[in-house]
Image (spheres, rainbow, N blue to C red):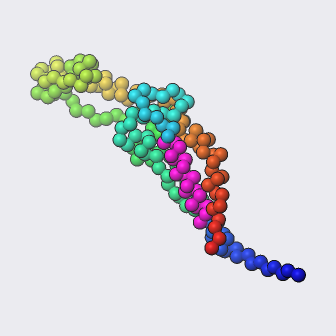
Amino acid sequence: MISVTTEFREKAVSRAAKIGSFKSLKHAGFGLRQTARRLVKKSKTSSQPGTPPHTRGRPGGLKKVMAVAIIDQDHVDVGPENTRGPTIWSLHEFGGRSQRKARKRKRATIGGTAPLTLENFKLGSRVRIRTQAQADRANEILDRQAQLEQAVRNYPPRPFMKPALAWDLPRMPDNWKGSIQGQ
């Protein structure tokens, strides 16, 4: 005759499950961030609507602002940090309309420099202002350009986090396999 006794240590099991789940959740979050970064391609042209956005590879671009924030034992936020341009990333993900805030501009004065034609403004060339008529013309051009910059812009949706999640979702249960270890 064989006799077996078992002991169930509930605290130890729940502690091991918490630790294992936290490690697995953290691993899943960083994997999702890596997938989202890989979906964003470097290109000089804009991406087609409905596809992940392209980046021009500038420092601080979309690939570099992807972050993982571990909120607590069972919550992880993955996505771009909103330190620069708080709404631009959500506009890319979901689409929408946006209007730039008005910037304070210097007024053209006699003795200063300013563009006298719209072409000069686009090229970035400036000329010395010598008369009040030139100053008035330059201020007119600066005002017109300011209005163009403040126009409402449409952003078609270019999701990058949703496709990353769809790509990683089938692999996520594997992160929890063997996560509860005995002590």
Camera-side residue of 94 and 66: 66
User: Magenta includes 158?
Assistant: no
What residue is drawn where x is 20% and y is 23%?
A: 125
The range drawn in magenta is: 19-37
User: In which quarter of the view is residue 58 placed?
Assistant: top left
Residue 121 vertical position relative to residue 105 in the rendered view, above or below: above
What residue is drawn where x is 52% and y is 51%?
A: 30
Q: Can residue 59 be seen here?
A: yes
Q: Main secondary structure of the magenta part?
A: helix
What residue is drawn where x is 45% and y is 38%?
A: 88
What residue is drawn where x is 54% and y is 31%?
A: 51
Q: Quadrant of the N terminus?
A: bottom right
Q: Is residue 123 left or right of residue 6?
A: left
Residue 82 vertical position relative to residue 154 in the rendered view, above or below: below
Q: Is residue 165 left or right of residue 100?
A: right
Camera-side residue of 95 and 177: 177
Relative image position of residue 82 (x, y in whole percent): 44, 46
Residue 170 vertical position relative to residue 114 in the rendered view, above or below: below
Q: Quadrant of the C terminus?
A: bottom right
Q: Is residue 16 left or right of residue 137?
A: right
User: Magenta includes 31?
Assistant: yes
User: In which quarter of the view is residue 113 placed?
Assistant: top left
User: How many numbered marks are there?
Assistant: 0
Relative image position of residue 144 (x, y in whole percent): 31, 22
Q: Residue furthest front?
A: 1
Relative image position of residue 181 (x, y in whole percent): 63, 67
Relative image position of residue 90 (x, y in whole percent): 50, 39
Q: Can residue 162 be seen here?
A: no
